[in-house]
Image: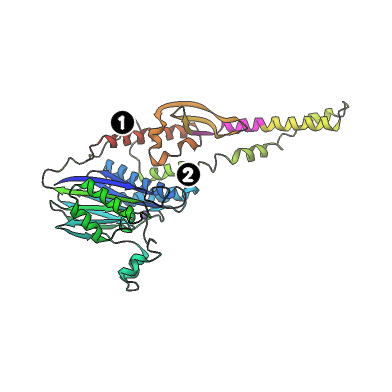
Amino acid sequence: MRAVVASATDIGHVREGNEDSYLVMAPLFAVADGMGGHRGGEVASSLAVDTLERLFARGEGELVEQIREANRVVFERSTLDRAVAGMGTTLTAALLEDDRAHLAHVGDSRAYLFRDGELRLLTEDHTLVHRMVMEGELTEAEAETHPHRSILTRVIGVDADVEVDEIELDLRPGDRLLLCSDGLTGMLNDEDIARALAEQPDPQRAVDLLIRQANDAGGVDNITALLIDLHEGPPDPPAQPRSVPSGVAPIRAPGDLAERGRVTGTVGREGRAEPTSRSAEQEPSRPPRRPLANAQRFPWTRLARRAALTIAVLAVAFVGVRVYLDLQWYVGVSDGRVAVFRGIPAEVGGFELHHVVVETTIRAEDAQALALYRDLPDGITADDRAAADAIVERIRVDVAEAAGAFQDPAP
Ligand code: MN
């Protein structure tokens, strides 16, 4: 069977950012709805989707395993980077294989099947209100307007492991498979969605209509819809798992994925606070004794002695800071390129506390397009030159893989 896919995401009328992410990488499709303070939600959903994409491209594991690995990656990042602590995301994915769809699902984004004019919900919402409905404590109608209807009982990225629902489905020509975030289903009920899908045979127009209607109904949340129309005919060639370019790092084990989160996570914690405390520690170790001894031979005033002492302390502190800075490494951006720096990514009183050691040919914007390296201009700290070079190689591989992914034919 042949799949024709249309997708759209919209910020809505109320939110200040779009925390939804989606993936169209035939035959794999996914929708993720992130949550968490500051940029946490955005990071969680894009990190989950990027990880799924990367593992699928490499042909590593089954869909459910890929999603559980995405969970680990988001969880690691959340525990190591205070800026995004506690973030999480939903993830609803569909993998088409011959005339079957394998669905994997966590959270309250949804998958629907529209067949013969009827809309059927395929996924179960992992929400508190759904559980209460199942236990007879709430009616469906009460659940729809419940103030806590968005509280999730299962999320990607909040625990080290997550249970993933699996749904298997036989497909027929004429079927429409809809993946969407709760920004759509919170605004439109199933009848509204069915009507729009019946009304609009063109998939892109159908998706645009759904988003417009959700916005007209209030648009209180980010809205994402991904529609897969199935037709008679030969399937599109599947996206083949790509091999890692030779001469660079081998395929990474799951632990390596976690390691990258750790590297990113240390930025800011070590980047700025330490130099002052380290240089302060070094002051007492070399007390400027000579000026004091000389003071007995020359008739210096108290003021002059104090000035000499201050200069000596500053000199020692300056040397201490220089020694400290020379031991620090990080990867950042120089002239729009990924570069290895010595020092720390900061400046004091107009003096930059770093200098470029190597400027690579990797364009910074290509690296920053990937969720993991979005904060590259802030610097990714490294223990030594070798670690900095290793980070650069990882960035190089990831950027190359991402470039490969965009070249794949995506309908
Ligand atoms: Mn949402």
Instruction: Please state which of residues 109 and 276 is positioned toward the viewer in this rendering.
Output: 109
Image coords of residue 58 (percent x, y): 28, 41
| Overall secondary structure of the magenta section | helix
Quarter of the figure with the C terminus: top left
Q: Is mark 1 within 8 Å of ligand 1?
A: no
Identified at 26% across, 37% down, the residue is 242
Image coords of residue 360 (percent x, y): 42, 27
Query: Most extreme residue toward the left, as rendered?
Result: 233
Give the total number of marks visible in the rendering. 2
Secondary structure at badge 1 equals loop
Task: Please indicate whether residue 386 sits to the left or right of residue 245 in the image.
Answer: right
Q: Which residues are magenta?
A: 318-330
Check residue 215 for magenta coloring. Answer: no
- The residue beneath circle 1 is 246
Image coords of residue 237 (percent x, y): 17, 40
- The residue beneath circle 2 is 265
